[in-house]
Image (cartoon, rainbow, N blue to C red):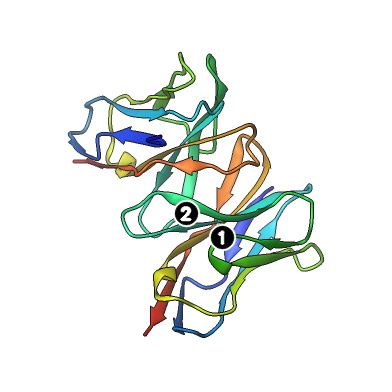
Amino acid sequence: AQSVTQLDSHVSVSEGTPVLLRCNYSSSYSPSLFWYVQHPNKGLQLLLKYTSAATLVKGINGFEAEFKKSETSFHLTKPSAHMSDAAEYFCVVSETGNQFYFGTGTSLTVIP
Amino acid sequence: NAGVTQTPKFRILKIGQSMTLQCTQDMNHNYMYWYRQDPGMGLKLIYYSVGAGITDKGEVPNGYNVSRSTTEDFPLRLELAAPSQTSVYFCASSYPSYTDTQYFGPGTRLTVL
């Protein structure tokens, strides 16, 4: 069975400091993993994805994530937070095209 | 390109009423999806389609129906609306497979009273 756990419902960081959003997953097979961002009253936008290629994945806006099979984790990081990064972030796991499992989301606040 | 468009943006239904949520994409994507997002929760897949004439159930299909007669359109039908269907509904599309980027519409906020 597939599932996703986002370990923090809220994260606050100061502008210019690193961001870490944590995601653990459960999957019986080799999953595809995604991070999406949702700004207020907007649809979701893909930040990055892992589909069994390089374990360190670089995405848009300076975000990256590392797939760690031994830890079943796919944490999202960014070296320096920007005010525009304030949003809701979702980790997603999928084994097949008919099953996408979203985490409950992490709300990122960036303090000026 | 408009991307993925959804109508209406907001709707209030009474219990037992029916409605269709419209979704159109102009990117010639073969995959299309319908999700619902309940407050404080992640998205849940309702139905998906891999191309015109082909649809299949996702995680939470009960109370909904879909059709896909064209590549562009993927309407979601709610029959006999219930308060449990109060949610924000998102349509998305991707090409050429489910591992590719999903492009989301702006959502439809539905309230059933």
**Residue B75: percent from left, percent from top:** 38, 24
**Residue A17: percent from left, percent from top:** 52, 85
Q: Are marks 2 and 1 on the same chain?
A: no
Front residue of this view, candidates A99 and A16: A16
Image side of residue B53 versus residue B109, left or right:
right
Which residue is the site of mark 1?
A60
In the displayed structure, A64 sits above or below A81; it is above
**Residue A8: percent from left, percent from top:** 52, 73
- Where residue B110 sits, quadrant-wise, is top left
- On the question of residue A74 being in view, the answer is no
Which residue appears farthest toward the front when viewing the image? B1
Give the Cα separation between the discs numbered 2 and 1.
21 Å
Q: Secondary structure at mark 2?
A: loop
Amino acid type of the residue tagged 1 in the rendering = Ile
Front residue of this view, candidates B51 and A61: A61
Q: Chain of mark 1?
A: A
Amino acid type of the residue tagged 2 in the rendering = Gly
Image side of residue A32 versus residue B60, left or right:
right
Quadrant showing the C terminus of chain A? bottom left
Estimate how packed mark 2 is, as few (under 14), some (14 to 19) or many (20 or more) residues with alpha carbons within 10 Å: many
In the displayed structure, B44 sits above or below A22; it is above
- On the question of residue B45 being in view, the answer is yes
Q: Chain of mark 2?
A: B
Which residue is the site of mark 2?
B42
Q: Residue at x 43, y 28 (%)?
A: B26
The reply to whether dot 2 and dot 1 touch (C-beta < 8 Å) is no
In the displayed structure, B46 sits above or below B70; it is below
Q: Disc 2 vs disc 1: which is toward the camera?
A: 1
- Where residue B106 sits, quadrant-wise, is top left
